[in-house]
Structure formats: structure tokens, C-alpha cells
Amino acid sequence: MTAKQPRLEIEYCTQCRWLLRAGWTAQELLTTFTAELGEVALVPGTGGVFDVRLGGETLWSRQEQGGFPELAALKQLVRDRIAPDRDLGHSDRHRKPSDG
Amino acid sequence: MTAKQPRLEIEYCTQCRWLLRAGWTAQELLTTFTAELGEVALVPGTGGVFDVRLGGETLWSRQEQGGFPELAALKQLVRDRIAPDRDLGHSDRHRKPSDG
């Protein structure tokens, strides 16, 4: 049984009880990128980990970046990689640097 | 980025809007088998699919079995394969054939 591509992976700390947060993030991403994501994997971890990886690339690492990813920003990171032409709606337009 | 083992996979029909059902099932299994499961992958599919696979084995196929898996029964199928000594609590004892 091989992973479907593109594969997004959310590794979360079970000791910190971040399953619901990881599950929510997974469902949000799958709602937005229904046709573009091959799968989202929830990976139990320990030691305060909350990492989001897409293919081989780490999009978010709690240890490196501190805290949790803001969902709109996370969707933009995913969008830029697997659906670059996708408009993410109001929050996306609001955040475009070109608006500044 | 390789899948973590043992890998459980839930393929759900996006057209049927079964993401929330799949997400709930994933979180239930990860709550019960926190230390035993390597990962649970949510896999978007089409055509009325709702399949649960563990390693190479199909534990539940909506097309073959009809309907959705009853969660207590699904946990027993998973338990028997990755945590055979685990007592699943009241519902498990209630359902043991030896009780009959």
C-alpha cells in the first residue's frame, strides 16, 4: 500500500493532545484542495512536534517557527506548490503583497 | 517522505461529502491506537468509495460490504492486527463471542 501523491503529512505530539488540531488542519486542507491532494496523513509523534510536510518539504515546523501555522498562510504555502493558479478567496486577496 | 508503518488508509468519496466521516473515523482510531498506528491517511476518492485498509489488507469496503463500518467493530479488526492484547473496554467485552 503506497502513499498517494502529492502527500501532505501532519506529525503531531500525542502527549500534547494535538490530534484534534491536526485532524482539523487535515480536514481544512482536504476541503480546499479536494482534487489536488493525493492524501493527508496524520502521524502521531511526541516531544512537542507539530510539523506539516508536503512531499519532501517541511512547510511548517513548530520547533523551528514556534507556535502553530495560521491556516490561511498554510493554505497559501500548499496552494503555491500544488495549485498555483488557485484563488483562495477573500483571505488570500487580502494578504497578497501586491495589495500593499 | 515515506509512509509510517503500520499505515491505515481511509479512502472516501468526495462527491458524497464523506470527508467528515472519514476524519472522524481517523481520529477515533488514532485516539484508541495512539502508540500502535504509524499513521492514518485520508485519501480523497470518488464513486461512492469508503474503504479502510491496513497495510495491504482491506478491512472494510463499502462496495463489498454495503454501508459504513460500525466503529466498535472496526476497532476490533484493527486491534486484532496491531494490538492483539488490547482490551477495547465495555463494547469489546460486550461483543466477544465467548460472551454468547
Image: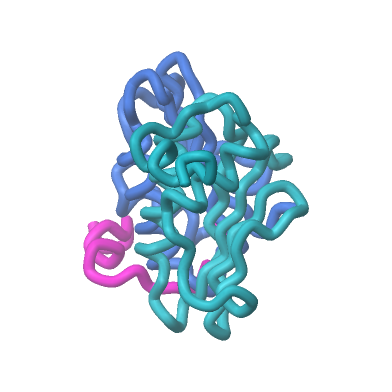
Chain colours: A blue, B cyan
- Where residue A63 sits: x, y (%)? 44, 20
* Image quarter of residue A69: top left
**Label tally:** 0
Tell me which residue sits at (74%, 54%) in the image.
B57
> Is residue B9 toward the left or the right of residue B70 in the image?
right
| Image side of residue A21 versus residue B72, left or right | left
Residue B72 appears left or right of A98 = right
Q: Is residue B88 above or below residue A70?
A: above
Q: Quadrant of the N terminus of chain B?
A: top right
Residue drawn where x is 58% and y is 25% of the image: B85
Q: Is residue A82 visible?
A: no
Q: Is residue A89 magenta?
A: yes
Q: Name, please, the residue furthest toward the top.
A: A47
| Coordinates of residue A2 in the picture (x, y in percent) | 76, 53
Q: Nearer the viewer, residue A46 or B33?
A: B33
Q: Position of residue B47 (x, y in %)?
A: 57, 85
Task: Please state the extent of the stretch shown in magenta in the rendering.
Answer: A81-100
User: Can residue B12 be seen in the rendering of this structure?
Assistant: yes
Residue at 53%, 82% (x, y): give it: B48
Residue A96 part of the magenta segment: yes
Residue in the foreground of this view, choosing between B16 and B93 = B93
Residue that extends furthest to the front in the rendered view of this protein = B100
- The image quadrant of residue B11 is bottom right
Q: B7 or A48, which lies in front?
A: B7
- Residue located 64% across and 77% down the image: B64
How far from the left and from the top, in percent, is residue B72? 43, 49
